[in-house]
Image: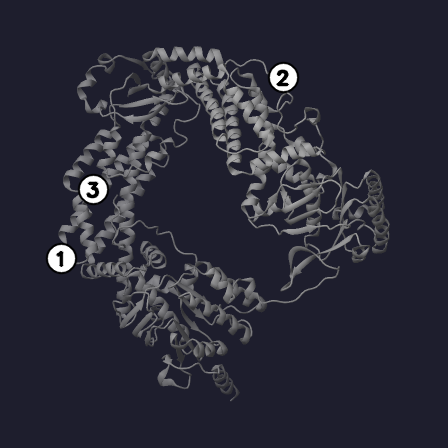
Amino acid sequence: MKKLNLLFPDEALIAAEKMPEPEYFRDLHLDQVINKITEGREDYKLSPYFYWLPQDLESIRFRQGIMHDLENTAVYNNILLFSKDLSGIRNSLAHIEKLYYPLQRQRNYLETAIRYQQLLKGLLNRLSQITIESSGLKAFVIKMQEIVDTEFFMEFENKSAALLEKMNSIRYAVIVKDNRVTVQRCLDENDYALDVARLWYLDMTGTSADESKPGVNSGYDMNHVEAQILEGVARLFPEPFHELASYCQQYMLPGELPDAKSDAECLKAGRFPFMSGDVLNWERELQFYLAYLDYIAPLKHQGLSFSIPEMLVQSKCIQAEQTFDLALAIRLQEETGQQVVVNDLRLSEGEQIFVVTGPNQGGKTTFARTLGQLHHLAGLGCPVPGLNTRLCLCDGIYTHFSYREDMGAGHGKLEEDLLRLHKNLDRATAASIFVLNELFDSTTYDDALYLSAQIMPQLLEKKSLTVWVTFMDALASFGPQIVSLMSMVDPDDLSKRTFKIRRKPADGLAYALSLAKKYGLTYETLMETIA
Amino acid sequence: MINISLLYPDDRKYDLDHVPGHAARLALDLELPVLFKAMARDDKTVDTAVRQIILGQRSTEISVIIFRQQIQKDFICYTELLAKLYQLSMDALGAYRESLRFWLSAKSASRRLRSNLDILDMLLTQLSSVRDLGESYPALESSGLKKFFRFLQKYYDDETLHSLRAQITTLRMDNGFSVSAKLDHNNRSQEFFLNRDQPSTHWLKNWFPLVAAEEGYSFTIAQRDESGLTALAEFRDAALEPVARLMDSAVHQLLDFFTRLRDETAFYRGALNLRAALEAREYPLCWPVPLSSQPTSCVASRIYDPCLALSQEKRVITNDLQASNKSLLIITGANSGGKSTFLRALGVNQLLLQSGLETAAQEFSASICDEVYTHFKLEEDASMHSGKFEEELLRMADLVPHLKATAMFLFNESFAATNEREGAEIAWQICTALLEKGIKIIFVTHLYTFAQRCYTQKGSNILALRAPSEENLSMKYKMSEAEPLNTSFAKDVYNRIFEYKNK
């Protein structure tokens, strides 16, 4: 029987678990993005999945299908809940193994078993009420149903429920006088405290809710007085406690870890006889989707758009409306709650190279990164920033960024740059992407212009999609394949950047405005804002 | 449960710490600290209460305003009742704080339970003293005070107090305790509840071991088993936590009652102090008449700014005002002509009116407004001239999101930090929008273009007032109805001072 894998439809294509981080990650700030995405999910070892570009349309479409299903909130929430609960169960199991008192350990196993059963059935039940379209998730549901329908699972479930019922019906009294503690069967039906409350005119509706206030008698730590009380209860009610012990013998004795394809922490719960190894694997694979969607959720909430891109194979007519730099958007959102500025990006037939000029700190580099990020994310099968997106299926992304701190490196630096550029131009194909940022800015202006004029024809000849950030206006009018873009300033306040990048012949300037508009104090805006 | 209030007839809950964000600015612009100081007379509790209530608990309901006015009238007749109520609540809270000193580390439930029971005992005593005051003052007229005492007599009669005290004794658990429990998901004892039969309630059982009576399982922690004793103490705390928490709420309920009584009586004490201070200076005072917010109206005779009256020795000039159905008051005229003072007088008295207090005028009736906002020119105009206009706009923009119809907005020489044309245009746009939204505006301005445009275009909605020029000594600081004048009186002042110096 063929195993189901939720990341790679064809088993032969499963990427090595030890894929290194691609070279362009740092320049494109994808390292920040992926670190953030996988943060808090270390147990799953997900990073390699975000490094590897499948490069075949079938895999991309398989993942896009699952992503598309998960964009439906109902599907997403159910899968998320499934994953959170399963992870909770794994944590519980690790804890329970270490518990000192057997009677306590056994009860915990029982509770965890029931959580596991409810988890699987609950998921199936809820997913059955939702339309699922992707072949990936459809197969997942079928396989899960097969597990739940086994005789093993059904018997396990019945036994657990009967046992829990018995445990829960136990009620007893504890009497403490000085140092003597007595456990006996309980007589009172009602809480005397309610009478007290009535007499004091206390409104108890609100207070009973925080009965489970943490800190008081919750958690695993059982002291030996409690343990002795528990012993007493077990003597008063022997039958359910015997039953519990034999139940644990059957389902809860940890064995050897079955063969796993990865050493990820999350798969270790497979040692328990009741736990299905397949469920653990699928949950790990689904983390890829959840992690990404979880990461972009606050941005969507801010009103930013994402879409699953159409993949272009021959054409370069890429398009993304209202797109943005993912790393920057998250940083702004987290640090200041601001929404990142969005830009449109489009190439028509025959166009190949964006040359971006304009004032500094105006969003040029951000724009360049965005183009690179979009193609990496699209290659992973993820929804990308922007609306109506069409992107290239690319075979490589080559970045050349100049950082200010490298300015002092002089000759050696330029030589290194040129060497790497030469190597990359050699490897590149018409399906490759170049992201060039302030190339050659460690040289004089004349030199930089000369070098640029040499590189440009090579890029044109390779037909590689390129974005080139530069301060040299001349590059923007090199040929018909060049699209000239500019970072814009606020027409009302020259010192203010709008972070908008527009098609515009390279130059630079703007005009003045009234401050009132800036502060929303014109008649029109006031009429709108005052309630 | 005990929500009885002397501020609101419906005994609603309110949060004294809730003061709107612009209140600090409002207090500064209207020079309210002078007022608060006179009301507090060095009593910090009164100072806090009057600040919080005047800035945060003004009412937009006529019934609430009348309710407070009536209570204060009673207190004017029976000042010693007010003093006693205030003192009893201060004493109760003081004794509570004192008891806390010994219980700072009382985190455990059993210790907390004991300290709570002691405190409750004390609070019940104070409560019955407050209750008994009602019988000493049978002639009270305000619905608020009558209801207050009726409430205490009904819910805390002698029988109730007796059973509460009996219960305090039981809950001390001097002979151990008995609880019921269940096993939780950890097999730990949980969901404790108190059994009706406590060891202490059945003294006879103390002679026979409980185990003898029923099937059970017992064990004893040896006196030298320290960890065992700690564990037992932990168990006791867990088992008694629900009761301790219950008694926490019992204590809090009574503390809330006394805190509220203290703050509310402090507020009325402040009111009496203000009355005394203004009467001592022979200024008129009146019970204002609150009117519904529509149509906008404000009628006053001999109105003045109480803050100025309290802070300067020189006699303050009073003004009269007839503004029915006017939503824009525009005040122009000479510098030091009393424009700002008049603006403040209207603002402060509006606050007093809506707080339920007496107002600084011989007669005063005004429409209720949702909130009072101020936008005053800042005095410190030294250094950064270019940023000043922007600062003014920023201050205005901060207020905009809070504005609601029926708010009242006081502008004092706003938007003048730029050239006249621009300032006038911005003031015009802002005022037009605010007026259309139903906000009432009083605008002191030198922007002639703006004032004139309002005067000619806003029609019957506007009342234009003018401060007299310096030459007109007989009319000093008296506002009169008049069209805005195009000549600034600054020239007069300039000429006067410079000619004087040149001589």
Q: Quadrant of the N terminus of chain B?
A: top left
- B399 over B241 or under it: above or below: below
- B420 over B32 or under it: above or below: below
Residue picked out by circle 1: B139
The amino acid type found where label 1 is placed reads Ala
For the residues carrying marks 2 and 3, which lies nearer the camera in this image? 2
CA gap, disc 2 and disc 3: 74 Å
Instruction: Indicate which disc residue B232 carries.
Output: none
Q: Nearer the viewer, residue B351 or B406?
A: B406
Residue picked out by circle 2: A259
Chain letter behind tag 1? B
Residue picked out by circle 3: B125
Q: Nearer the viewer, residue B372 or B212?
A: B372
Chain letter behind tag 2? A
Residue B80 visible somewhere in the drawing: yes
- B354 over B238 or under it: above or below: below
Side of A394 relative to A175 (left or right): right
For the residues carrying marks 1 and 2, which lies nearer the camera in this image? 2
Side of A258 relative to B490 (left or right): right
- B115 over A239 or under it: above or below: below
